[in-house]
Image (cartoon, grey):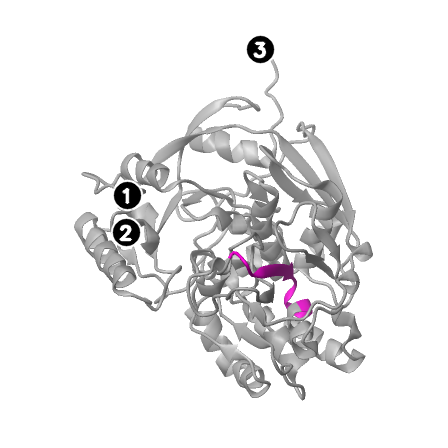
Amino acid sequence: MAAARPLTAVERILARTSGAASVRPGDIVVCAADRAVLLETLFMPNSLNWRDPLVVAAPERALIVFDHAVPAPSAAEAGAMTRARAFAERFGIEKVDVGGHGISHQIVAERGLARPGELLLCSDSHTCASGAFNCAARGVGGLELLQVVCTGGTWFVVQPTIRVELSGALPVGCEGKDAFLALAARFGSADNCNLEFTGPGVTGLSLHDRRTIATQCAEVNAEFVLFPCDDVVRNTLAALGVHEGGRPGGFTPAVADPGAEYAATWALDLSTVVPQVATPGAVVGNVIAAADAGNVQLDQCFVGSCANGHLEDFAVAAALLRGRHVATGTRLIVTPASQQVFLDAVRAGYVAEIMAAGGVVTPSTCGACFGYHMGVLGDGETCLTASTRNFKGRMGSPDAQVWLGSTRTVVASAIAGRIVDPRTVDAAAGASAAGASAAGQGARVT
């Protein structure tokens, strides 16, 4: 009998959920989802992405999160949430309006619903955020998610996997966003490939930075994104009452076999990373050092989204703004990724610090990230954002310019009124921000 083919970590999850002994790139597999996350956007009137189903295969595996447009900015969004609640009641879905409201990827993280070795599907393209938890997670189309809800699963083509080898440690003044942008600048797109992060550099990355990096990998077109399940992940989940130990009830991490085949290796020494920004239009092919941006005057600076609406982002923003003020003519908008993040930021005093410096803090939502409400850009405006995307028209007017950078870069630039390297902020403030960020990383996932 031939020896079993060594599997990558992603292949291991696809094999388990499809019931296959082994898989390889090019195979078509039908996989049972461990978790299906529905958003209120699927229930919008006249949506082409939804049909009322006759059956829900596994209501205990489904949850409904209201995240893109909350609180409802119009009657249409309010109606969508009404329909979603009725749908949940009809089919016995108990996890509905989870978290009050907040971004779905944050909600599943802080509720321990993104688990190592599992398959999680949602209709949002940044579902790969849960890859930080060793969870194979990805966005699918609305009709495909309906198929998942009705049948319990869907099909995938097994794609090749790229190994991302991280070494070193991020310098002071740099964040996970900078590491991602450095990867995008050096290696470009990962079209039709999975990304598996490994190497000694992963150990030194906070879960916050890993989540930012995993989320942003949607911008290099990765299929699945996976970080290892180490003590950082195990301890975080244990604090949430979720433990390793096999199914049912626990989780089994996905680990690559020795000798697993990778399509390529991307190697990055984190110690070489400097603050980065992506220029308007895209990420791939558009990354430069923040110091090289030139005299880019800013109308708006935004901190939020699934990538950077965490408690640690509030900590950094508050520390940098302490004793300072947002520049005249520039507005700073900060949006928490969940109600829990908002509450924790209020208790820690971060919200007061941000508002005292002239920043605006909004309710938790996707909001300005995708140009829907609470921060839409007008014609000719320029924004530096710590959210996920910067393509034309992403945050409002197609005549607006959207730059992408880390929370630290965005807040430092809000103070200056133009794009700056955040390391130009004095050393005392930088050290204070680093300490505040570390203090924000406790048992609660933020």
What segment carries the magenta color? 398-409
Residue 269: % across, % down: 80, 50
For disc 3, the neighbor class at 10 Å (few under 14, some 14 to 19, many from 20) is few
Which residue does the image show at 54% across and 33% down from the upper left?
12
Q: Are marks 1 and 2 in contact (CB under 8 Å)?
A: yes
Foreground label between 3 and 1: 1
Residue type pointed to by label 1: Trp
State which tag comes first along the sequence, 3 or 1. Answer: 3
Of 247 and 218, the residue lying toward us: 218
Q: Which mark is residue 50?
A: 1
Q: Secondary structure at mark 1?
A: loop
Earlier-in-chain disc, 2 versus 3: 3
Mark 1: few/some/many CA within 10 Å (<14, 14-19, 20+): some
Task: Name the kind of residue labelled 3 in the image.
Answer: Met
- Check the image and report above or below for 183 versus 55: below
Q: Residue at x 65, y 85 (%)?
A: 322
410 on left or right of 350: right
Q: Secondary structure at mark 2?
A: helix
Disc 3 from disc 1: Cα separation: 47 Å
The correct choice, above or below, for 316 with respect to 40 in the image is below
The residue at which mark 2 appears reads as 43
